[in-house]
Image (spheres, rainbow, N blue to C red):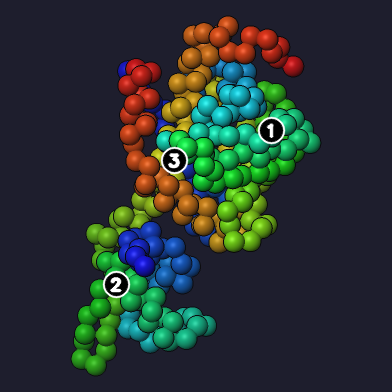
Amino acid sequence: MKAKPETNIIAEPGRMDVSIVREFDAPRDLVFKAHADPELIKQWLGPKKYEIKIHYYHSKSGGSYRYSVVDKSGHAVATFNGAIHEVTAPERIIQTFEFEGLPERGHVTLDCTTFEALPGNRTRVTVHSVCRSQADRDAMMASGMESGVNEGYEKLDALLTKTA
Amino acid sequence: METRRDVFQAIADPVRRDILNMLTHKQLNLNSIAENFDISRPAISQHIKILTECGLVTINQQGRERYCYLQPKKMSEVSDWLEPFRKLWEERYTKLDALLENMQANPRTKKPKRKKS
């Protein structure tokens, strides 16, 4: 089995942003496509045990998207939407992101995903996510904590075994 | 209602994070903690109560004063607070790894009709 690349999270205390950095063992065109084609996005974006149901996804500059995370019975557990500011193949996607389940609207993040070609047909993806306040940033991290803790490693292990 | 009492609940509130920061330098009594905040003493007491219930802070009676100090072992769980968020993305990206591998291995099985624009 190949060593799995590390996912690095950079979230300094007292700031409104977080960066997620990860390398992929695939050429940049392909990695970009997996982030820009809704049919491909839905195959990896969802958390464990859930699927992604796309309501609409216009993956282009000036586009927009809305999708739900649905359980096995098709019940939506969370819905997200955003405006797509820029889709520039194969280097950059900029969009907003909003979780519709919050008590009030307006807690939007601005996400810039950049794709950097590396030697050996590898690609580095950086997601830089800026919230509107420190509190929003910390709340976002906290929601990650909860789902991360709850979901555990089972599906990840299964995938690793399958791709080994 | 079940109340969560773990390190993540402890650090979910900014006042409690500030209290924890103060206690990393030295143990403090309730008054010296409270004077750093604009909120009422009972509110501070409540935060400290939550911190003790979460196992992060212990209260030690010294004469007439009650001093709060950190439980360093529990605090190490807080220092790993990014870990679950990282795992969430790792899980997602592990799926993407598999997808990319599949796309490279079987280029024709993926949406053959669609030309790249």
Query: Which numbered tag is attached to residue B88?
Result: 3
Amino acid tagged 2: Thr
- Numbered badge on residue A57: 1
Please say if the residues under marks 3 and 1 sit with CB atoms less than 8 Å apart. Answer: no
Report whether A60 appears left or right of A141: right
Real-space Cα separation, disc 3 to disc 1, in angstroms:
23 Å
Q: Residues within 10 Å of mark 1 (few under 14, many from 20)?
A: some
Instruction: Determine if residue A42 is in view.
Output: yes
* Residue A42 located left or right of residue A95: left
Where disc 2 sits, the SS reads helix
The chain containing the residue under callout 3 comes to B
**Badge 1 sits on which subunit?**
A
Where is residue A94? Give x, y as percent.
69, 37
For the residues marked 1 and 2, what is the alpha-carbon distance in whole angstroms? 47 Å
Identify the residue at image location x=51%, y=57%: A138
Question: What chain does badge 2 belong to?
Answer: B
Residue B60 located left or right of residue B99? left
Q: Quadrant of residue B11?
A: bottom left
Return the disc, 3 or 2, that comes first in the chain's sequence: 2
Q: Secondary structure at mark 3?
A: helix
Could you say which disc has been placed on residue B52 in the image?
2
